[in-house]
Every structure is written in structure tokens, then in C-alpha cells.
Amino acid sequence: MSDSIKKYAEMYEKKLEEKMISKGFGEIDSHDEEHVMKVVCKHFDLELTDTWSSDCDHYIYEESTADGYTVYVSLHDDNANVCISENIFYYDNDLANEFQQAIYDNDHGDVKIYLSMLHDGEYWIDDALRDIYIELVDLYTDMCKDELTDEGWEELADPSKEPSIDMLNLIANNE
């Protein structure tokens, strides 16, 4: 690959990263769990809370059985009857899917989800948010690439593909 093609590819990647950072999806921030939560919540216009209120759109919380075992409840309505086969979970590893589904089901803006264990360092909350974040990275990467295309940039999908003469002139003028 020629030096000019390498330089063009580097410039394209730099521009793409700048756009991703401006939208909250930079590489460095992607490793910060708090940032990931913030970005997912912003995208879905979502509030996560560990304060019980009747105005939440979904509830995920811990309960104890009569004989002292911990179970987990996932409901769309705090006044709904609990259906053991649909709303009760014995293991917390199933809660990540419930949480993700609650986010997707309530993707209509101004949504509040109650998680009793929000600040307890539960791995499944971070895992669910991370999975959604990764999907959003793919979505925003495509959006940013489209924006770069609209600005006249061409992505080099194939390393052997040469950029257009206009792109080579752009590189030459920016040196």
C-alpha cells in the first residue's frame, strides 16, 4: 500500500474517531462503565433509579421467599399481579436479558426503570448496558461514516482500492 493511501486511511480513521467522540462513543470512554451507562441512558432518554416510585415503566428488584431464598422480580407495572412463571427469576444471570428487553420495549422516550440493586455493583447490569452500548457503537459508526461520505470522504474497504484523485489532492493540500 502506498504512503499516500496509508496517510489517507489514517486521516479517515482520525476523522471517524473525532465524530464518534463528539457523539459520546470514543474508544477511550468505552472502557468506563459510568460513561457507558450515561450514553445508553441518553440515547434511549432513559432514567435508571433505585428509588421506588409508582411512575416507573419497569421494575426489577430482589425479594425473599417465605423460607429465606432470594428471587428476582421483573414487572412492567408495579400494580400488576406477579406471574411466577413469567416474572420471577431464581438466578440473577437471567436479569440482564430482562433489563435489555425492558430498555428496548420502552424505547419511546422519557422512560424510568427501577433497579433495586442499581448501585450494588451487579455484573448483569454492567453486562446488559455494555451489550447495548456495543450495538449503539455499530449504529453510530455507520452514521458517522455516512456523515464522512457526505463530507466527501471515502472509506477504503479494500486496502488495494485507491482513493479518488480528489482525495489524493485533498491529502496533498493538507500537507
Image (cartoon, rainbow, N blue to C red):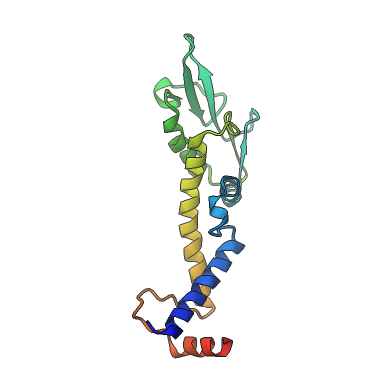
Q: Is residue 33 above or below residue 59?
A: below
Q: Is residue 174 above or below residue 123?
A: below
- In x, y percent, where is residue 171? 52, 86
The front one of 58 and 124 is 124
Residue found 58% across the figure and 51% down from its top: 39
Quadrant housing residue 89: top left
Residue found 48% across the figure and 19% down from its top: 70
Q: Give the left or right position of residue 102, taking residue 22 as reference.
A: left
The front one of 103 and 96 is 96
Residue found 49% across the figure and 46% down from its top: 130
- In x, y percent, where is residue 114? 59, 32
The front one of 36 and 45 is 36
Quadrant housing residue 78: top right
Q: Is residue 99 visible?
A: yes
Residue found 49% across the figure and 69% down from its top: 145
- In x, y percent, where is residue 22? 61, 63
Q: Quadrant of the C terminus?
A: bottom right
